[in-house]
Image (cartoon, rainbow, N blue to C red):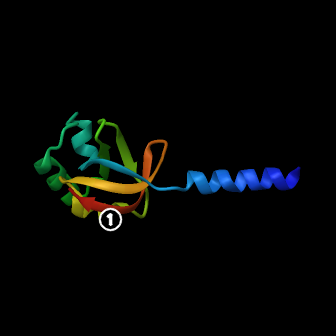
Amino acid sequence: MKKLGLALALSLVAFSAKADEFNGFVSSEACVRERRTTLDEECAKSTVSRGARPVFVRSDDRTFLIADGDEDRMRDYAGYKVTISGQIDGDRVRIESVKRN
């Protein structure tokens, strides 16, 4: 019985670790606070270049913080539509790969 429980737990961990693809754009916390939920390339680029934290806005307008360690590489995508491969956990997204659309 314990072996079955362990096998089930391991399979759930493996399943939950699967990366999914999401479409959206990279903005900044500052732009989102100003309720700019549509892509505002100028706002995103200027605020991120001045140090604002980049965020991912999914195509359904839900905003996600970018997980620590992924922020620096996402700065280059500020103001662009992107497709990311990664995992969403609550209000954060861990990014495995990103490409501009």
The residue carrying mark 1 is 72
Question: Where does the image place residue 18, in percent across and percent down from the top left?
Answer: 52, 55
View extreme (left): residue: 42
- The single residue placed furthest to the top in the displayed view is 35
Q: Position of residue 95 (x, y in %)?
A: 40, 59
Q: Is residue 90 left or right of residue 2?
A: left
Give me the residue at 59% from left, 53% from top.
15
Quadrant for the C terminus in the image: bottom left
At label 1, the amino acid type is Asp
* Of residues 57 and 8, the one drawn nearer to the viewer in this rendering: 8
Left/right placement of residue 44 relative to residue 1 reads: left
Q: Quadrant of residue 31?
A: top left
Element at badge 1?
A: helix
Q: Where is residue 85 shown, x and y percent of the image? A: 39, 57
For mark 1, does the 10 Å Cα neighbourhood hold few (<14), some (14 to 19), or many (20 or more) residues? few
Does residue 39 lie above or below 49 as drawn? above
> For the point 67% across and 54% down, which residue is it?
11
Of residues 72 and 4, the one nearer the viewer is 4
Q: Residue at x 76, y 55 (%)?
A: 7
2 over 60 or under it: above or below: below
